[in-house]
């Protein structure tokens, strides 16, 4: 069902948007990368807590960008 799939994907992206906002002060570089990948045009540094932590602020139809890893892979040999 395409409608349900769109809802699930929106909810996942909205959850990531919220996670990105609250994690930004701790991991700014990684969260800025994720923010851009989510396709959000506004700068993450302009987000305000708690105003921007409301559910549903991600504009429906926002196109995500190409997804890249946020962190380098740790090789087993290095452990």
Image (spheres, rainbow, N blue to C red):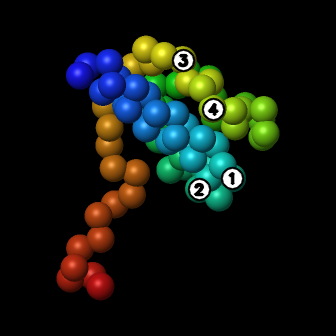
Q: Which residue lies under the disc numbered 3?
A: 59
Looking at marks 3 and 1 on the same chain, the residue that comes earlier in the sequence is marked by 1
Q: Which residue lies under the disc numbered 2?
A: 27
Q: Which residue lies under the disc numbered 4?
A: 55
Looking at marks 3 and 2 on the same chain, the residue that comes earlier in the sequence is marked by 2
Disc number lying in front (3 or 4): 4
Disc number lying in front (2 or 4): 4
Q: Quarter of the image containing the C terminus?
A: bottom left
Secondary structure beneath dot 1 equals: loop
Asked if labels 1 and 4 touch by Cβ distance under 8 angstroms, the answer is: no
Secondary structure beneath dot 2 equals: loop
The alpha-carbon separation of the residues under discs 2 and 1 comes to: 6 Å
Q: Residue at x 60, y 41 (%)?
A: 18
Disc number lying in front (3 or 2): 3
Left or right of 51? Residue 20 is left
The alpha-carbon separation of the residues under discs 3 and 4 comes to: 11 Å
Residue 3 point in image, percent of width and height? 32, 18
**On screen, 18 above or below 38?**
below
Quick one: which residue is furthest to the left in this view?
A: 77
**On screen, 74 above or below 60?**
below
Left or right of 76? Residue 35 is right
Q: Which residue lies under the disc numbered 1?
A: 25
Secondary structure beneath dot 3 equals: loop
The alpha-carbon separation of the residues under discs 4 and 1 comes to: 20 Å
The alpha-carbon separation of the residues under discs 3 and 1 comes to: 23 Å
């Amino acid at each position: 069902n395409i409608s349900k799939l769109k809802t699930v994907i929106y909810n996942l992206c909205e959850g990531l948007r919220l996670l990105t906002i609250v994690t930004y002060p701790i991991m700014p570089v990684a969260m800025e990368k994720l923010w851009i990948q989510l396709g959000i045009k506004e700068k993450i540094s302009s987000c305000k807590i708690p105003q921007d932590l409301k559910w549903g602020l991600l504009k429906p139809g926002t196109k995500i960008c190409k997804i890249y890893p946020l962190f380098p892979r740790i090789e087993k040999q290095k452990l």
